[in-house]
Amino acid sequence: MSKREFEDDYVEYLLDQLESARRDRFEAHLKGCAECKKELAELREALFSLPLTLPLKQPPERLKDLILKQATADSVLFRVGWRQRGYQVWALAASVLLLILGVYAWQQWQAGVEMDRQVSLLREENRRLRESNQSLSDRVDLLTRPDTKFLRMVGLENYAGTSGSAFLQPADRTAVAFIHELPSLSQAQDFQMWVIQNGRPPIPSEVFKSSGVTTEVRLSVPIQVNEVAVLAVTIEPAGGSPQPTGPMVLAGRFEK
Amino acid sequence: MGVETDLLEKVKTGDPAALSKLYDSYSAIVYSFAERILKDAVSAESVVQDVFLTVWRKAEQFSPERGSLCTWLLTLTRNKAIDALRSSARRNSTHVSISAEPDACEMPAGIDDPLVNVIEGEKRDLVRRALADIPDEQKIPIYLNFYNGLSHQEISEKLGLPLGTVKTRIRLGLERLRLELRQS
């Protein structure tokens, strides 16, 4: 079996999404394919670099004591003396290594001024990226909260290829919609979202443009979530309208 | 051999001081990751305990050819946290719930070596920059699987996208992340 045959499997394997027969075949192949092993290791490194962007939080102090006590108890019960013999050699090697790294760190420190400037630039960029990451986490959070209401949106008449889904959060009256394959508009037009209650005029909401294959729209909902009957998107003059004037592209009714 | 793997070699010899240093270096990221998945401090502590005792008892299972020590620790963390998440969801018959992120803490814990800390900090920045270049439509399904343990099928239903599209977006997103990190 060739490497090519398994190219689509790397990611699903890492995410534990391969069905068992396929996984067994992939693992059997991995044993004899250094190239696939390397490829998989690289993808694993990339995937598990994601938590490095999380805000760091320290576990409680007592946890370390608990773990070390348990480890020591393990040693008494299970570990054997011969393992200790290598300790001093490794300790010496580690000390030498730390000394070398220390000298290197000292040289780096001497290059200080330029590095300080770079660090300050990087901190600023870091802050911006952390905010962006937080915003993305908030959206994932919204999608997975148990009280989130789900709505499937369907393209109407001439817009059958358009579809979407919306997730509405009752607690903070926010929603996020993912709309796929919106039609092209002229410069003088925008899309506009409408929040509709039964028997009431539509309430104007977000005005937006298409941003590629999938457009994400975040909106605040001006009424109680359980009063929302329909979300709809129309085409309006640029900047939006107080009442719908253009064709309706897609709409969906909230499941009660 | 790096400082990290050197510490692991000491752990293999049964040196509790090495385990203590390893804990100082990685407990914050392991705990933060577990708490991100479980959204519960007590359960996250239990995962941290489990991870470091696994390291202590089965350090020989670490294989550098499969990835770095940090990746191994985070793989153990994710496996244990997702298992806990699923068994808790089964017990409570509820969906996965996520609360707000913990407050940011500027400085992570680190090995007692300034160079190693600088390198770790640089890697964090690299990942943040790499992620900024990946479209949200690819990141969101990756996050839903990675942090919430949702299957591709569940993500497809959640986002109202065909299963094939979800798989493609996840694959493209991860391959792009790998490429960005490789080029950095």
Image: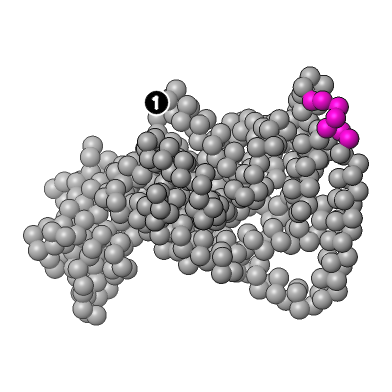
A215 is higher (above) or lower (below) than A224: below
Residue B134 position, x and y percent, is: 45, 64
Identify the residue shown where x is 21% and y is 52%: A153
Q: Please tell me whether residue A84 belongs to the stretch shown in magenta.
A: yes
Which color scheme does this rendered protein use? one colour
The image quarter in which residue A181 lies? bottom left
Q: Main secondary structure of the magenta part?
A: helix
Whether A145 is among the magenta residues is no
Foreground residue among B182 and A155: B182
Residue identified by numbered label 1 = B93
Q: SS of the residue at dot 1? A: loop
Q: What is the number of callouts on the image?
A: 1
Identified at 88% across, 65% down, the residue is A103
Could you say which is closer to the camera, residue B102 or residue B53? B53
* B71 versus A132 height, above or below: above
Percent x, y for residue A59? 69, 39
Magenta range: A79-85
Where residue A225 sits in the image (x, y, percent)?
30, 44
Q: Classify residue B25 as left or right of residue A84.
A: left
The percent coordinates of residue A176 (x first, y second) are 34, 53
Dot 1: few (<14), some (14–19), or many (≥20) neighbours within 10 Å? few
Disc 1: host chain: B
Residue B29 left/right relative to A201: right
The residue lying toward the viewer, choosing from B171 and A156, is: B171
